[in-house]
């Protein structure tokens, strides 16, 4: 008999059906991979299983006992825990208290047992990554560490059913490895696990069974056993478009051809941006590189080795302590984001929910922000030209939206990211900085995002892309720089740009 | 063998000293937000001491403490609610209501001191429950909901006591004036409130209160009923409000429906001077208490500096702005 049964779950948001009659059965000790494009209903399903969200129809039961819908407490008491995609932490409380948020380790009379809680929190966190400051307020951690605390929070409950909603989207390779180790040992001890990820390799390595959702419907499922039939999964995920995406991602010949073409075109390319000895804070300690016109430069590195800080500093968002930047050969002092935007250096920030978008405002509002804020006659709102620009961007980037007056929140992650990129189309972008642009975005939308970036670079702009997924960088970039402890340890180009060289550089062993 | 022995002898000591250091660091980081308030307090105290040579004499200290006790209590009440991520604009009117209950009930019903105090406590807690239910269960904006309930409390106080007058049980006034050494008995409710808060900070509820103020959504998703936390937070705060009203009533020994009104915004100002974030979840009770003392002592400074009474309010406002400037500068940390 299955441990967790969800039967005929249906959930609507307004007129949109997020989940349509989906059923799941989960056995003890099993790892179920949940796959699907963005907006296919994975997060909705997992939040319904965890009681955060209420289904319109359908029943949930654990061990044959029905669970009340929409009550996180009941689900937790029954032994279901979830690590959310967007960590739910109390930003002002220290890390160790966040690990036990809502499940405090108490003595008699519900007084906190601080020493026991700290010890246990340290154990749980160290199983994921070494070297934590337990007293650091959770709000000051970076995205990856917040994700790890969110995971530790779910582990702390010692649940019977554990749901991971895209736990690895923000994590670096080493952390993903230790997470997979933890998940395997939990499964071996009989915990049932739901694992959501866009990375096929992780599903392949971890899961016993994979279930695919498409547009809120059950599309199919298969046994994994160490190998995943990617073509079938991609076909289930998005029909014909999915097949095309698979072809795109796996056609290595096409990739290398593209790279040859672009590097040939750019071999003599002028230097668009050059940086010498950039230093900022503790994370950025001397970065040198040149960016040529029309190229896509990838920044690889393990989480927290200064990649995000580099892009923030170039965008004028983080103060530089030292270093020189020259744009098209002319030296430039970074003063503020506005100053850098005027110079044509534009950032697509890392956290699109917090830094990139006004989620409750319309697609139109979000797309027009830059145009409105930088127009030369600020006292007039040019509705006509704004509307034209918005329509043009929507069609150029193929943003899927029923109506540009729809709130951005209603869009899928990939389309939200396209909106963030789209607002720069209004102006002459010389250097586009992208910080993990495909985080939490499905395969098809990934391809479209890189096509949008490609279109910009063909028009003469240059792009710097930081992504946590090295394979992706290898596939789309013309050149790669690898960062380690705040410095560039390798610059790879042409045939040197392969996984082995990158991996050795990631861990500080210079490839040269 | 010998090495092992010394290791064993030294290890616990080192461990202890490390733990002490960690503890000090933790306390310092928890209370870092109170620093500007503390600095402000030191400045105001030194101004006061300069202008009033006998500031540190026993008489002056204890009379200052007597004056400060109700202000500290009402600021602590506001701090609890602000840490919870909400606001309460009805505390001043609540003080008036409790004051009028204390002054009117004995003559209306002939109850004794104890019964009157219990009735007043019940009124205060009922007001807290009312605000807590509105904000927690009905998800009303705290600003509007407590503004409305404040008007109701004020109306209730006016009904009980249309004109200032009545008589608060005399025992209260006598207790209030009593002194044990330098320490006036008026400090007892403040110390009790502080002790209660300190104990709660080691308790699950106290931490959930801060967590809810920090991110109510995260706490709800962690399976905690945030409605209950908010309700209990308001009740706790109104326990402090009752303490404040008791002190004020004992001081004035009569009832006045307008007596408490200025306390509302003073309490908000004190909390902000003390470095408690109005967004909730960040700040410390020590900061709020410093803020309250700053407000009380500013009145002294203005008086002893011989500033014409017409300018007193202007001066007070300027000092509050200065204090806010300090918190603003300290809040700008390097990224």
Image (cartoon, coloured by chain):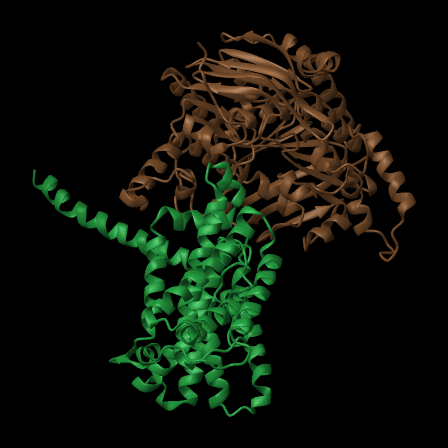
Whether residue A383 sits left or right of residue B134 in the image: it is: right
- Chain in green (letter): B
Q: Nearer the viewer, residue B132 or A377?
A: B132
- Chain in brown (letter): A
* Residue A11 location (% of width, % of height): 64, 25
Q: Is residue A34 above or below residue A507?
A: above
Q: Nearer the viewer, residue A320 or B179?
A: B179
* Residue B177 location (% of width, % of height): 32, 81
Q: Nearer the viewer, residue A38 or A244?
A: A38
Whether residue B172 sits left or right of residue A346 in the image: it is: left
Residue B143 at least partly seen: yes
- For the view shown, which residue lies furthest in the front direction? B109
Q: Is residue B201 above or below residue B73?
A: above
* Residue B135 location (% of width, % of height): 55, 52
Residue A133: quarter of image: top left
* Residue B67 location (% of width, % of height): 41, 79
Q: Residue at x 78, y 46 (%)?
A: A370
User: Dividing the image into 4 quarters, which one contains the C terminus of chain A?
Assistant: top right
């Amino acid at each position: 008999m299955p441990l967790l049964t969800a039967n005929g779950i249906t959930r609507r948001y307004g007129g949109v059906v997020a989940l349509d009659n989906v059923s799941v059965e989960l056995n003890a000790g099993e790892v179920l991979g949940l796959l699907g494009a963005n907006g296919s209903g994975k997060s909705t399903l997992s939040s319904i299983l965890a009681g955060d969200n209420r289904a319109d129809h359908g029943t949930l039961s654990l061990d044959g006992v029905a669970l009340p819908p929409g009550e996180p407490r009941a689900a937790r008491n029954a032994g279901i825990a979830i690590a959310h995609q967007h960590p739910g932490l109390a930003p002002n409380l220290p890390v160790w208290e966040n690990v036990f948020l809502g499940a405090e380790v108490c003595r008699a009379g519900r007084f906190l047992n601080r020493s026991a809680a700290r010890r246990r929190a340290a154990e749980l966190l160290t199983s994921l990554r070494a070297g934590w400051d337990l007293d650091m307020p959770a709000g000051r951690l970076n995205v990856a560490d917040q994700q790890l605390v969110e995971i530790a929070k779910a582990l702390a409950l010692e649940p019977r059913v554990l749901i991971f909603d895209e736990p690895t989207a923000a994590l670096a390779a080493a952390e993903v490895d230790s997470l997979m180790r933890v998940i395997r040992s939990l499964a071996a001890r009989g915990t049932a696990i739901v694992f959501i990820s866009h990375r096929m390799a992780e599903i392949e390595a971890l899961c016993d069974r994979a279930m695919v959702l498409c547009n809120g419907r059950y599309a199919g499922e298969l046994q994994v056993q160490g190998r995943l039939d990617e073509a079938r999964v991609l076909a289930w995920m998005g029909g014909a478009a999915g097949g095309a995406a698979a072809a795109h991602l796996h056609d290595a010949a096409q990739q290398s051809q593209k790279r040859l073409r672009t590097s040939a075109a750019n071999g003599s390319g002028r230097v668009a941006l050059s940086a010498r000895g950039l230093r900022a804070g503790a994370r950025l300690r001397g970065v040198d590189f040149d960016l040529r016109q029309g190229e896509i430069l990838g920044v690889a590195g393990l989480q927290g080795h200064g990649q995000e800080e580099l892009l923030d500093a170039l965008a004028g968002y983080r103060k530089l302590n030292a270093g020189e930047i020259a744009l098209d050969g002319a030296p430039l002092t970074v003063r503020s984001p506005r100053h850098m935007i005027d110079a044509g250096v534009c950032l697509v920030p890392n956290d699109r929910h917090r830094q990139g978008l006004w989620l409750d405002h319309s697609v139109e509002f979000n797309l027009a922000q830059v145009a409105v804020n930088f127009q030369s006659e600020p006292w007039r709102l040019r509705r006509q030209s704004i509307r034209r620009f918005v329509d043009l961007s929507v069609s150029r980037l193929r943003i899927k939206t029923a109506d540009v007056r729809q709130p951005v929140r209603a869009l899928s992650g990939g389309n939200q990211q396209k909106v963030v990129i789209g607002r720069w189309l209004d102006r002459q972008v010389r250097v586009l900085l992208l910080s993990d642009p495909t985080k939490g975005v499905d395969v098809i939308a990934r391809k479209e995002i890189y096509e949008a970036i490609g279109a910009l670079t063909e028009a003469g702009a240059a792009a710097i892309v930081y992504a946590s997924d090295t394979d992706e960088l290898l596939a789309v970039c013309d050149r790669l720089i690898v960062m380690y402890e705040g410095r560039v340890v390798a610059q790879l180009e042409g045939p040197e740009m392969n996984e082995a060289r990158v991996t050795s550089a990631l861990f500080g062993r210079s490839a040269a | 063998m010998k090495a092992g022995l010394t290791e064993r002898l030294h290890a616990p000591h080192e461990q202890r000293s490390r733990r002490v250091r960690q503890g000090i660091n933790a306390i310092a980081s928890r209370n870092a937000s109170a620093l500007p308030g503390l600095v402000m307090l030191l400045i105001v105290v030194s101004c006061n001491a300069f202008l009033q040579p006998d500031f540190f004499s026993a008489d002056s200290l204890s009379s200052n403490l007597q004056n400060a006790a109700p202000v500290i209590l009402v600021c602590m009440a506001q701090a609890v609610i602000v840490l919870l991520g909400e606001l309460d604009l009805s505390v001043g009117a609540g003080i008036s209501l409790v004051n009028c209950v204390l002054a009117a009930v004995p003559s209306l019903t002939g109850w004794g001191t104890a019964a009157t105090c219990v009735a007043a406590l019940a009124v205060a807690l009922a007001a807290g429950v009312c605000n807590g239910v509105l904000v927690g269960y009905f998800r009303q904006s705290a600003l509007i909901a407590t503004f409305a309930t404040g008007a109701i409390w004020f109306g209730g106080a006016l009904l009980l006591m249309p004109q200032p007058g009545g008589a608060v049980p005399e025992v209260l006034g006598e207790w209030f004036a009593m002194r044990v050494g330098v320490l006036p008995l008026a400090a007892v409710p403040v110390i009790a409130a502080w002790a209660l808060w300190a104990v709660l900070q080691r308790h699950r509820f106290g931490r959930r209160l801060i967590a809810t103020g920090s991110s109510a959504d995260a706490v709800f998703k962690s399976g905690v009923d945030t409605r209950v936390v908010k309700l209990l937070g308001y009740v706790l705060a109104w326990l402090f409000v009752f303490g404040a009203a008791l002190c004020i009533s004992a001081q004035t020994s009569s009832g006045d429906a307008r007596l408490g009104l200025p306390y509302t915004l003073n309490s908000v100002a004190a909390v902000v001077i003390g470095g408690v974030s109005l967004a909730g979840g960040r700040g410390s009770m020590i900061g709020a208490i410093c803020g309250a003392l700053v407000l009380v002592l500013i009145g002294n400074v203005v008086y002893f500096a011989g500033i014409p009474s017409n300018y007193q309010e202007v001066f007070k406002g300027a000092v509050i702005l200065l204090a806010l400037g300090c918190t603003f500068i300290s809040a700008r940390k390097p990224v």
